Image (spheres, rainbow, N blue to C red):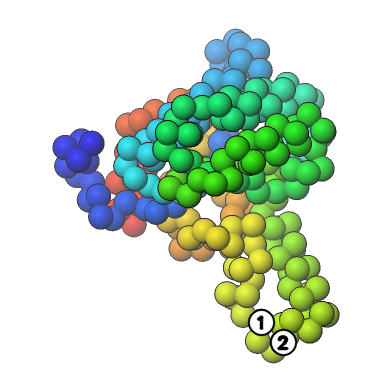
Amino acid sequence: MLDRLRELRLDKGKLPKHIGIVIGGNQLWAEEESVEKDVAFRKSFTHLMDSLDMCIQLNIPILTVHLLSEKMRDSPEFPDFMNTLIEFLDKLHDSKMIHTNQVKISIFGKWYKLPDRMVNSIKSVLNKTAGYDKLFLNLCINYDGQDEIVDACRLIGKQISMGRIDPDLVNRQTIKENLYTASFLPVGLLIVTGPYKSNEGFLLWDTKHAAIYFAKKNWLEFQRQDFFEALRFHQRA
């Protein structure tokens, strides 16, 4: 891998410690390829494991992926997406890649408001990887970036009302400590795939200084060479 990095003119010492990915364009890809959307969703999760494998090989310790926004719950594709996501979570539970590399899985968002089948699969994979701490895969499910900050403010408000925090001492670090991402470094590189022209409200607090790479490709068209190009973009930024 070191030879490959030199070939690609990448400095191993300047690789990001935390990569965020916005997955987009799965439904467009399904229409273009004339396949069912559940096929696209299933391929999308396999594709995600390829990206995780790249992070493992490059020793990039944190990968956070935007899988399911709150607004998608109201879409007609939600049942198919939910079923394939449950399949994916169950595979993560028994994945050799996850357990060999001690990848801890965390879920960000209001996942506890989803149907019981989904909640049970999430709890199972969280419990299975709870003791790992070498690498981290964070999945944003039923997630909204503004809600993450609102929830942090609510937590801070409760602590103020209980006398645990002086309101005059609330600062940026206080907010960071109450975000879903409290335990993680800010994002260094954010990769946006699909038709999106913005970060889709993803990790709003933690992407302030991130290099944002708009792939201009649907997620299932985003290949390893594109991943390396995003890393080069990050090192030039």
Residue 234 as seen in the image, left or right of residue 9: right
Question: SS at mark 1?
Answer: loop
Q: Could you tell me which quadrant the N terminus lies in?
A: top left
Q: Amino acid at mark 1?
A: Val
Task: Give the residue drawn at x 57%, y 34%.
Answer: 24
Measuring from the top left, give residue 153's x and y in whole percent. 74, 69
Q: Is residue 232 toward the left or the right of residue 95 in the image? A: left
Is residue 24 found left or right of 234 in the rendered image?
Answer: right
Q: Residues within 10 Å of mark 2 (few under 14, many from 20)?
A: few
Q: Residue at x 70, y 39 (%)?
A: 123
On screen, residue 33 versus residue 178, left or right, reads left
Q: Residue under circle 2?
A: 166
Q: Amino acid at mark 2?
A: Asp
- How crowded pointer 1 is (Cα within 10 Å; few <14, some 14-19, many 20+) is rated as few
Residue 180 percent coordinates (x, y):
64, 57
Image quarter where the C terminus lies is bottom left
Q: Is residue 123 above or below residue 183?
A: above
Q: Marks 1 and 2: CB-CB under 8 Å?
A: yes
Q: Residue furthest top?
A: 34
Q: Given the current orientation, which residue lies at the most extreme front position?
A: 131
Mark nearer the viewer, 1 or 2:
2
From the top left corner, tell me how far across and down residue 216 is, in percent. Answer: 46, 36
